[in-house]
Image (cartoon, helix red, strand yellow):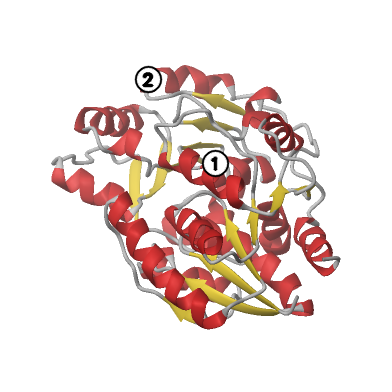
Amino acid sequence: MKTIATIVGARPQFIKCAPVSREIRRNFDEVLIHTGQHYDYNMSEAFFQELNIPEPDFNLGIGSGNHGAQTGKMLIELENTLTEIMPDLVVVYGDTNSTLAGALSAAKLQIPLAHVEAGLRSFNRQMPEEINRIVADSVAQYLFAPTRTAVNHLHREGFDKQIHLVGDVMYDAFRFNSQIAEKSAILKQLGAASKSYFLVTVHRPQNTDDPAILKALVSTLADLNELIIFPIHPRTRNLMQQYNITVKSPNLHLIEPIGYLDMLKLEKHSKLILTDSGGVQKEAYFAGVPCLVLRPETEWVELVEHGWAKLIGNDFSRIPEAAEGFKDFQCTATDIFGNGQASLKIAEVLKSL
């Protein structure tokens, strides 16, 4: 094996691919393909710069759109690009439309596929991400699972020799960048002291597409007797404007999307994190901060089982009591996501092929 094509397109994938690409490039030629799913500077280019990810060899510039249209455009462009490159292996990450399109393109062209973060299941097929990850696993020859739970899911679905338990590559990224993030001036810029605020991220359709639900969430946050820092996803901001949702509380600070290092700094110094993001749930755990999950289920069930996170769903009236329950939270270290060497383990598997 000589050439590996890595396909990314969204913020979480940039974070995941950074440590893996470092290891891949020690042994192989890597061609980096950016679908353009996330194209806003704060959601895309800033991450490449901060994480020292090489400039993409191809940027397909797909942009946003409905799931079917976006995935279809990606399939067309990825098939053309992969046909030009003809790599020995395609690597995809996570569960976005870029993951789905990359997996299907590789399968149609009969190029071996590796899926990093395989085996995750929320068991909610109304989530597009659940469909994406199931399809990617079903056509991959190499399933790099982050947890023992993910391995068990794959075994129950009939997979066997293609499974490799490697740990979570986001933990690799967190360990590598944790001290670097301390140099961030984001707290000073926001006038916030360490452990004086709650951090919020919201972007999933189940919390944003229904005006009543989004209004209820913003209202609940505004009524909390806490400083709330809310880096707002462009999609969420657009919907708030569309629904005429205004923020009147001086405690609720909506800020523009921020880079990875600024986000790590905010996560590490927050009292509590409220999120519907899978990646932020994990980063909360890495940072030793409790988390309220603004979803009725999570693919990261270990966090709930070990007491690090609580599921809220969209019954936001539960937030004050749940937050109070974490007031005297004590960190208890576990090795849920491995030892921070997932990227090295992935590279070792690929080298052995």
Read off the residue under disc 2. Answer: 315
The structure residue drawn at horizontal position 82% and vertical position 49%, both measured from the top left corner, is: 339
The structure residue drawn at horizontal position 31% and vertical position 51%, both measured from the top left corner, is: 68
The structure residue drawn at horizontal position 42% and vertical position 56%, both measured from the top left corner, is: 190
Give the vertical position of 83 relative to 150 (above or below). below
In the picture, measured across the screen, residue 195 lies left or right of residue 223, that is: right
Amino acid bearing label 2 = Asp
Quadrant of residue 191 in the image?
Answer: bottom left
Nearest to N terminus: mark 1 or mark 2: 1
Q: Position of residue 272 (x, y in %)?
A: 54, 35
Please name whichever residue, 273 or 248, is drawn nearer the observer in this view of the structure: 273
The reply to whether callout 1 and callout 2 are in contact (CB within 8 Å) is no
Q: Quadrant of the C terminus?
A: bottom right
User: Which is more foreground, mark 1 or mark 2?
Assistant: 1
The structure residue drawn at horizontal position 73% and vertical position 34%, both measured from the top left corner, is: 155
Q: Position of residue 93 (x, y in %)?
A: 58, 56
Read off the residue under disc 1. Answer: 134
Q: Quadrant of the N terminus?
A: bottom right
